[in-house]
Image (cartoon, grey):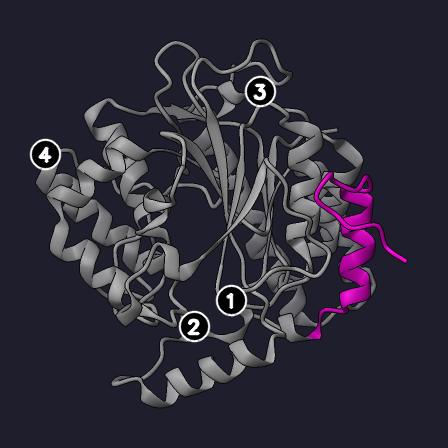
């Protein structure tokens, strides 16, 4: 049965159940957007052809970097409230509480990493002097505090752009590393060649087919950061390509990041010093470095199977069920956003799904009583 027929049948069934008009309209908009993306992708991209199961170890070490925050920590909440009171300008809606909300995703992301990507050398978890109660450090996993990579005047920081602009200064970090948000997970066993070219170790960039919408042009979110990247890359290389990068793990080269930092020293410094997201921020790891690499030929474009799930979306449960049942996604992200009724998510529901998606404990978990 064709996808169009399946979707038409689903829409008819929803109508028979007399769902609210707003819900039906949302479904139609979602389906239309997904169909458009599929048509564009099939016309403009090649399938990911890197091996999905380990072959040989990488010729150079590859590290993993996570950023993580415990939004339930009373000390962190106190610092956040004080920083907001002292802010010289209104805090962007992209610093909404949903951006910091956690459902213990780091535990489950590490589970998928340990079982599905055993080729990495070391894991670094960058935090605001916080450590999950269940986490066990060892020779392969280290916690890095913000003060180790950011100036004292930049602390405390609640700006992911600021933190990401300094990841390449983690002491002991390998030249080649993959940056994960804690809500990014591996859907199946993957080889290092998903993230780096198997001959040159150039980082792979997972491009979308879409450019940022006009909405949010004056706000300090990912769309504005992407537009800033487009302008900078065109100025530095003469290449103008506004397509965004997937919200998925980012393969990075520390030497390339140091080169960019030297070229854009004032912008890097300003971004690192913003305690909250700012309209002039660079999105270094998630946008600037990957797109600069593609423009210069020091990165390669790849198109793995990726599923993005907004936990505030009405179809979030359906998409999580698809990840679990099909096992066809290389990577997936379970993202809390400021849009929609994210505060209504039941943590027990999230825990159930995360246990289904990643049931086996990692080597870095304490045994539960």
Q: Residues within 10 Å of mark 2 (few under 14, many from 20)?
A: some
Mark sitting earlier along the chain (3/2): 2
Is residue 93 on the magenta stretch? no
In three-dimensional space, the C-alpha distance between marks 3 and 2, rounded to whole angstroms, equals 35 Å
109 or 328, which lies in front? 109
> Residue at (26%, 31%) from the top-left corner?
255
Q: Secondary structure at mark 1?
A: helix
11 to 361, vertically: above or below: below
> What residue is shown with label 2?
95
Mark sitting earlier along the chain (3/4): 3
> What residue is shown with label 4?
238
Mark sitting earlier along the chain (1/4): 1
Q: Residues within 10 Å of mark 1 (few under 14, many from 20)?
A: some
Asked if the residue under mark 2 is in contact with the one under mark 4, i.e. CB atoms within 8 Å, the reply is no
> Residue at (55%, 44%) from the top-left corner?
34
Q: Position of residue 236 (x, y in %)?
A: 10, 38
9 to 24, vertically: above or below: above
Q: Is residue 188 left or right of residue 149?
A: right
Q: Secondary structure at mark 3?
A: loop
Asked if the residue under mark 4 is in contact with the one under mark 3, i.e. CB atoms within 8 Å, the reply is no
Q: Secondary structure at mark 2?
A: helix
Is residue 366 on the magenta stretch? yes
> What residue is shown with label 1?
99
339 or 358, which lies in front? 358
Q: Which mark is residue 191?
A: 3
């Amino acid at each position: 049965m064709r996808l169009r027929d399946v979707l038409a049948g689903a829409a008819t069934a929803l109508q028979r159940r007399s769902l609210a008009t707003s819900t039906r309209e949302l479904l139609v908009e979602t389906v239309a957007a997904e169909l458009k993306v599929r048509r564009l992708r099939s016309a403009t991209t090649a399938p990911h052809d890197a091996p999905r199961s380990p072959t040989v170890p990488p010729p150079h070490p590859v590290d993993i970097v996570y950023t993580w925050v415990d939004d339930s920590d009373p000390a962190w909440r106190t610092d956040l409230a004080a920083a907001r009171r002292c802010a010289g300008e209104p805090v962007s809606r992209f610093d909404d509480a949903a951006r910091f909300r956690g459902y213990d995703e780091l535990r489950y992301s590490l589970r998928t990493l340990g079982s599905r990507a055993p080729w990495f050398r070391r894991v670094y978890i960058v935090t605001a002097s916080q450590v999950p109660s269940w986490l066990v450090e060892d020779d392969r996993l280290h916690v890095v505090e913000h003060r180790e990579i950011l100036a004292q005047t930049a602390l405390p920081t609640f700006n992911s752009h600021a933190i990401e602009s300094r990841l390449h200064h983690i002491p002991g970090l390998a030249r080649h590393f993959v940056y994960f948000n804690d809500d990014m997970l591996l859907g199946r066993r993957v080889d290092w060649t998903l993230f780096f070219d198997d001959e040159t170790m150039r980082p792979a960039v997972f491009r979308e087919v879409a450019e940022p919408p006009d909405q949010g042009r004056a706000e300090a979110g990912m769309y504005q950061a992407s537009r800033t990247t487009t302008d900078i890359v065109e100025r530095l290389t003469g290449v103008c390509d506004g397509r965004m990068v997937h919200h998925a793990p980012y393969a990075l080269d520390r030497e390339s990041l140091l080169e960019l930092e030297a070229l854009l020293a004032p912008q890097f410094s300003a971004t690192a010093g913003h305690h909250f997201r700012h309209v002039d921020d660079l999105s270094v790891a998630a946008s600037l470095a990957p797109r600069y690499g593609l423009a210069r030929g020091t990165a390669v474009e790849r198109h793995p199977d990726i599923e993005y799930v907004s936990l505030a979306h009405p179809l979030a449960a359906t998409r999580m069920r698809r990840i679990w049942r099909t096992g066809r996604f290389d990577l997936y992200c379970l993202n809390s956003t400021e849009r929609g009724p994210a505060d209504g998510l039941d943590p027990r529901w999230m825990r159930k799904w995360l246990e289904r998606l990643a049931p086996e404990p990692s080597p870095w978990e304490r045994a539960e009583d």
